[in-house]
């Protein structure tokens, strides 16, 4: 299957090289075509659209930092530990997990990568404004819809992790600063982008195999529901529910029968998959000095047990980060088909490996380093695993619909049916009724390691009672509302020339 992937043409090489630098300056070359002329044709504008997808793949390793955006969510919740060699290994992660990050010790690359994505989306829209010589109205509508949804997706990282940020929908000029807006104002921009994109009616409901990875209408619907529910914007719940039902009623999507197949390579872009971020190992050239080159992901290396014998139990080793909590494993019923598909019980394997910090013998099977997972790579095997990141799945559509029905006073029978479908696939009996509490509980079991749990606890007001000190002394602080947003990295405060106010973390 072809995948929308990293664009490596000469016309955009400078964009990738400058993504982790202090600013996004544009310098005219005396020998090369100016960018506004280069991107005036359909072929070249399409290149800039593909480039707007590029930062999706960077957060696992770029700008000198590991910060997979799903994992950065999970370590602040209650299913995974941080792990590594000790509490100073990837110290920023440990501080975030204990709600004690500081402006000097907090993830920074996610901020840069989000703004890189926003900037590239703005590039496309501004080039369209200048005119594309050989483009049809349908071309322009498609490009516009794609990058407006992508821009909202990148802004969603900033919104959730940092809250009040500078934001712009036209690229900056000297002195390259923008007013800081509130989280509520940023939400309005995001929902406006998604609504405008949907209104264009220019996206396929599901991408073709050759276009897998492109934004689709169903992906836009899922992003809309995610941010509306996180904002608790009840005025938009009915619309979000309508969108979920459109996906449910579409023949394009359904649950796969066997949960254990979802996260295999063969399970990529299954009928359950609404949107994934693509990675590939075959001919991958991503390396330590070229982290933004075409290739795979380092996530499996990050989260697999250290010094694991290559190929033992069908797995390769890694660095021992993000081990699964014993309590998470025990939270599953032994009859739940998701347990062993989600959690790798390395303690039961009898294989010797280097047991590191916070390691209770459980790791995340969903994205573990499989024995052949980096086959065909041409650079660093550690960086080039072929695991696509599953971002939106059909099971989440069902659970979103169930929750929105309960929240809006809809049919209890219908909500229970959607919840039952997810539980039946896991081999579990129905619950007596669908409630917010048991829907959130089902989401926990369904999405371990997929970056959902932390935000679910915040939006349902459960964080302050769930995210509390543990019995081992690893987490010593309790989550509180002033911990909802991370500190803005001090490096960004310094570069903002007095235009950024720090979060009250």
Image: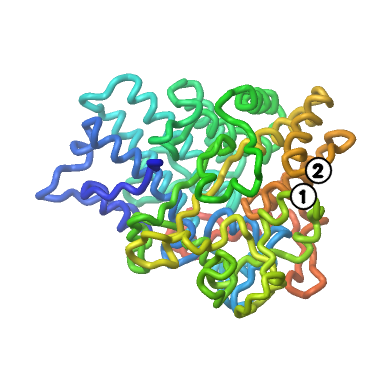
Question: What is the distance, in whole Å, between disc 1 and disc 2 at their CAs?
Answer: 6 Å
User: Residue visible at 45% across and 62% down?
Assistant: 61
| Residue annotated with mark 2 | 428
The reply to whether residue 423 is in sight is yes
Q: Which residue is mark 1?
A: 336
On the image, the x and y values in percent for residue 344 come to 66, 62
Residue at the extreme right:
432
Look at 44% across and 38% down and name the residue there: 212
The residue under the point 77% across, 75% down is: 473
Q: Are marks 1 and 2 in contact (CB under 8 Å)?
A: yes
Q: How is the image coloured?
A: rainbow
Quarter of the rendering occupied by the N terminus: top left
The answer to whether residue 263 is above or below residue 202 is below
Return the disc, 1 or 2, that comes first in the chain's sequence.
1
Judging depth in this view, the residue of 369 and 153 nearest the camera is 369
Q: Residue 107's spot in the image, x, y percent?
A: 53, 63
Q: Residues within 10 Å of mark 2 (few under 14, many from 20)?
A: some
């Amino acid at each position: 299957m072809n995948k929308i992937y990293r664009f490596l043409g000469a016309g955009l090489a400078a964009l990738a090289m400058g993504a982790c630098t202090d600013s996004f300056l544009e310098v005219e070359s005396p020998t090369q075509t100016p960018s506004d002329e280069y991107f005036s044709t359909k072929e070249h504008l399409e290149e800039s659209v593909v480039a707007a997808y590029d930062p999706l793949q960077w957060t696992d390793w770029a700008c000198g930092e590991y910060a997979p955006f799903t994992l950065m969510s999970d370590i602040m919740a209650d299913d995974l530990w941080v792990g590594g060699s000790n509490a100073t290994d990837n110290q920023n992660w440990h501080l975030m997990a204990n709600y004690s990050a500081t402006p000097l010790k907090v993830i920074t690359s996610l901020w840069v990568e989000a703004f890189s994505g926003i900037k590239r989306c703005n590039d496309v829209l501004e080039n369209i404004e200048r005119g594309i010589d050989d483009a049809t109205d349908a071309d322009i509508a498609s490009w516009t819809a794609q990058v407006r949804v992508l821009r909202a997706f990148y802004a969603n990282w900033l919104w959730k992790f940092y809250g009040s940020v500078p934001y712009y929908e036209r690229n900056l000029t000297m002195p390259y600063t923008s007013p800081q807006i509130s989280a509520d104002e940023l939400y309005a921009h995001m929902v406006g982008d998604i609504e405008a994109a949907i209104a264009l009616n220019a996206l396929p409901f599901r991408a073709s195999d050759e276009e897998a990875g492109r934004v689709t209408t169903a992906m836009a619907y899922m992003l809309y529901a995610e941010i509306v529910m996180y904002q608790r914007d009840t005025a938009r719940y009915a619309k979000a529910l309508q969108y979920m039902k459109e996906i449910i009623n579409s023949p394009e999507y359904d649950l796969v029968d066997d949960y254990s197949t979802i996260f295999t390579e063969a399970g990529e872009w299954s009928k359950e998959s609404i949107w994934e971020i693509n990675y590939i190992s075959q001919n991958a050239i991503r390396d330590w000095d070229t982290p933004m080159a075409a290739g795979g992901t380092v996530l499996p290396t990050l989260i697999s047990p250290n010094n694991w014998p290559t190929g033992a139990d069908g797995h390769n080793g890694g660095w021992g980060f993000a081990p699964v909590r014993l309590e998470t494993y025990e939270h599953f019923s032994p009859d739940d088909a998701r347990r062993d598909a989600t959690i790798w019980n390395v303690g039961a394997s009898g294989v010797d490996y280097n047991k590191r910090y916070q390691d209770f013998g459980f790791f995340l099977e969903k994205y573990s380093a499989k024995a052949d997972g980096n086959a065909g790579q041409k650079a660093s095997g550690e960086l080039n695993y072929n695991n696509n990141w599953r971002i939106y799945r059909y099971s989440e559509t069902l659970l979103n619909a169930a929750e929105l029905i309960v929240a809006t006073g809809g049919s209890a029978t219908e909500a229970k049916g959607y919840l039952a479908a997810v539980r039946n696939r896991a081999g579990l009996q129905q619950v007596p009724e669908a409630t917010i509490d048991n829907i959130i509980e089902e989401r926990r079991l369904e999405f371990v390691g997929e970056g959902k749990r932390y935000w679910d606890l915040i939006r349902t007001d459960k964080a302050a009672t769930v995210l509390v000190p543990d019995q081992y002394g690893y987490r010593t602080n309790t989550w509180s509302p002033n911990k909802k947003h991370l500190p803005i990295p001090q490096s960004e405060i310094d570069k903002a020339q007095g235009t950024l106010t720090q979060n009250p973390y």
